[in-house]
Image: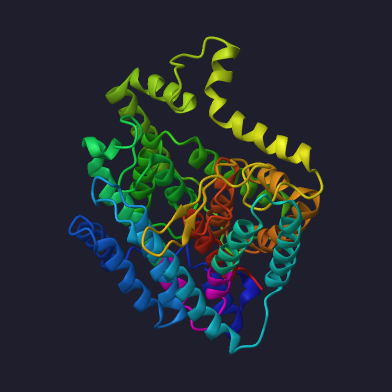
């Protein structure tokens, strides 16, 4: 259904673009493709690098295939180690894939000659962050390298979808099918030991750790839950898929995924209250049928698991600490300890250098942590840090000057995405951003940050222009 304001040929095209996610359907060919990709990784030790090599070749075909290759490559590099052995060459190949795919996209977009507005704010942030890093970073070269990889990923994902050669409905089906594949092939692992390989109690499914599974699933899960219970054009499989996604996320015991979904839902609720004009996707009533499904499902869960739900909730909040019950304020403080150290570290960095920070990508004044190098070529592959909460991390690394430039860049993406899209698109994009409140992957183009940017680029391209 198209908003009355969107009548005519151009309006119909706009309405189709805005409604693409609410009309997305499962492409079982994509689901099968993901299954095959995961299956063959358990073969020879070179399979991950070989798969990434094929994806590199595929990415050269068009901007669309480049974006699809990136999204498949993320799953290959984050596969459960019980399924596939460690393959060091894959760490290098994923960067080759990113740079080749980005080059293919940029080459196609430069032919149009137009520079999107967000790119100007990105250039401003990069320039300021790089300048500050030269003066404040303990490892300026590492800071600049991280800025380069960040910019390459953002340009590829944001500019990639912004073209007439991209069928947004096809990509809506693609993302939904990738999500469904991860859920469907992860569910059997709920009953197998290597589904909990990381720590023995938190579920990681097909991916290499529980946090990765929850972060990957969170954006599409919250969009599915809205579509299944409130959407205008639901399908019979939407609610089961959404509930199965919630089961996987709950079993992962990741608070980051839960917070991302809650923040996205809260912001969209505020949008609905604040915007007087109707949205382009009407929301239907909850309905007795869905109400009965929800009630019956809840009752069955209570009967089946009983007191185990309380124990699970306690473990979920405690996040693997020694706390088993919450009988005092001290217990709650112990449960929150997993994030307090990161917050304090960011505040320490900010207090030390409030205007310029300690350098982009640096964990502290002393540097950016241990650097991982390719064993064959000696090239730096990663220098991971764990700054946690995104806004404080930005202030700690780039100070007030860099933080202001980052905020301008963020708002150039966030405002159109949050206010000029349908509800399910807004949920998808906002949840992809909100995961950074628990684990900062905003600048991590070698990890799940790239997946979140792919979703952000898609949502931004589907906005009402």
Residue at 30% x, 47% y is 80
**Residue 25 or residue 347, whichever sits in front:** 347
The answer to whether 309 appears left or right of 391 in the picture is left
Instruction: Indicate whether residue 170 is drawn in magenta.
Output: yes
| Residue 156 image offset from top left, x and y in percent | 53, 71
- Position of residue 434 relative to residue 196, above or below, is below
| Residue 49 image offset from top left, x and y in percent | 30, 65
Residue at 49% x, 54% y is 382
Location of residue 7 by image quarter: bottom right
- Position of residue 392 relative to residue 278, above or below, is above
Instruction: Confirm whether residue 266 shows in the render.
Output: yes
Which quadrant holds the C terminus? Answer: bottom right
**Residue 183 or residue 398, whichever sits in front:** 398
The answer to whether 219 appears left or right of 393 in the picture is left
Image: magenta residue range? 155-173
**Residue 114 or residue 136, whichever sits in front:** 136
- Position of residue 230 relative to residue 457, above or below, is above
Q: How is the image coloured?
A: rainbow
Instruction: Confirm whether residue 462 shows in the render.
Output: no
Direction left: furthest residue: 43
| Residue 369 image offset from top left, x and y in percent | 55, 44
Location of residue 129 by image quarter: bottom right
Instruction: Indicate whether residue 256 is drawn in magenta.
Output: no
Q: Main secondary structure of the magenta part?
A: helix
Direction bottom: furthest residue: 111
| Residue 153 image offset from top left, x and y in percent | 54, 66
**Residue 462 or residue 116, whichever sits in front:** 116
Residue at 60% x, 83% y is 10
The answer to whether 306 appears left or right of 371 in the picture is left
The number of numbered badges drawn on the structure is: 0
Residue at 58% x, 19% y is 333
């Amino acid at each position: 259904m198209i908003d009355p304001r969107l009548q005519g040929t151009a309006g119909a095209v706009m309405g189709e673009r805005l409604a693409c996610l609410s009309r997305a359907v499962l492409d079982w060919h994509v689901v099968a493709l993901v299954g095959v990709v995961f299956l063959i990784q358990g073969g020879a030790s070179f399979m991950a690098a070989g798969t990434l090599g094929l994806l590199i070749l595929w990415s050269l075909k068009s901007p669309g295939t480049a974006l699809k290759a990136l999204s498949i490559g993320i799953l290959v590099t984050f596969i459960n180690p019980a399924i596939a052995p460690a393959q060091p060459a894959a760490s290098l190949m994923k960067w080759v894939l990113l740079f080749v795919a980005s080059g293919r996209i940029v080459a196609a977009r430069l032919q149009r000659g137009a520079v999107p507005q967000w790119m100007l704010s990105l250039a401003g942030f990069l320039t300021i962050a790089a300048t500050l890093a030269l003066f404040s970073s303990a490892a300026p070269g590492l800071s600049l390298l991280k800025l380069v990889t960040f910019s390459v990923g953002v340009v590829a994902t944001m500019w990639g979808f912004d073209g007439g050669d991209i069928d947004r409905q096809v990509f809506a089906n693609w993302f939904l099918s990738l999500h469904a594949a991860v859920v469907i092939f992860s569910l059997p692992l709920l009953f197998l030991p290597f589904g909990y390989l990381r720590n023995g109690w938190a579920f990681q499914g097909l991916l290499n750790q529980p946090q990765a599974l929850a972060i990957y699933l969170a954006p599409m899960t919250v969009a599915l839950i809205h579509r299944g219970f409130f959407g205008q054009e639901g399908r019979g499989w939407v609610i089961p898929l959404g509930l199965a996604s919630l089961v996987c996320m709950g079993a992962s015991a990741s608070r980051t995924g839960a917070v991302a979904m809650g923040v996205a839902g809260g912001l969209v609720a505020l949008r609905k209250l604040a915007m007087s004009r109707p949205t382009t996707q009407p929301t239907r009533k909850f309905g007795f049928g869905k109400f009965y499904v929800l009630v019956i499902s809840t009752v069955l869960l209570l009967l089946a698991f009983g007191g185990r739900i309380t124990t699970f909730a306690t473990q979920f909040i405690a996040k693997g600490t020694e706390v088993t019950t919450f009988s005092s304020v001290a217990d709650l403080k112990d449960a929150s300890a997993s994030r307090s150290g990161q917050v304090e570290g960011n505040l320490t960095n900010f207090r030390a250098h409030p205007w310029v920070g300690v350098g982009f990508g640096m964990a502290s004044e002393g540097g950016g942590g241990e650097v991982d190098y390719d064993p064959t070529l000696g090239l730096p592959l990663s220098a991971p840090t764990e700054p946690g909460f995104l806004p404080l991390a930005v202030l700690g690394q780039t100070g007030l000057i860099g933080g202001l430039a980052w905020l301008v860049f963020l708002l150039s993406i966030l405002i159109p995405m949050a206010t000029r899209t349908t509800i399910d698109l807004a949920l998808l994009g906002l949840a992809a951003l909100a995961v950074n409140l628990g684990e900062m992957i905003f600048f991590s183009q070698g990890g799940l940050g790239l997946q979140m940017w792919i979703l952000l680029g898609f949502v931004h391209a589907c906005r009402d222009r």
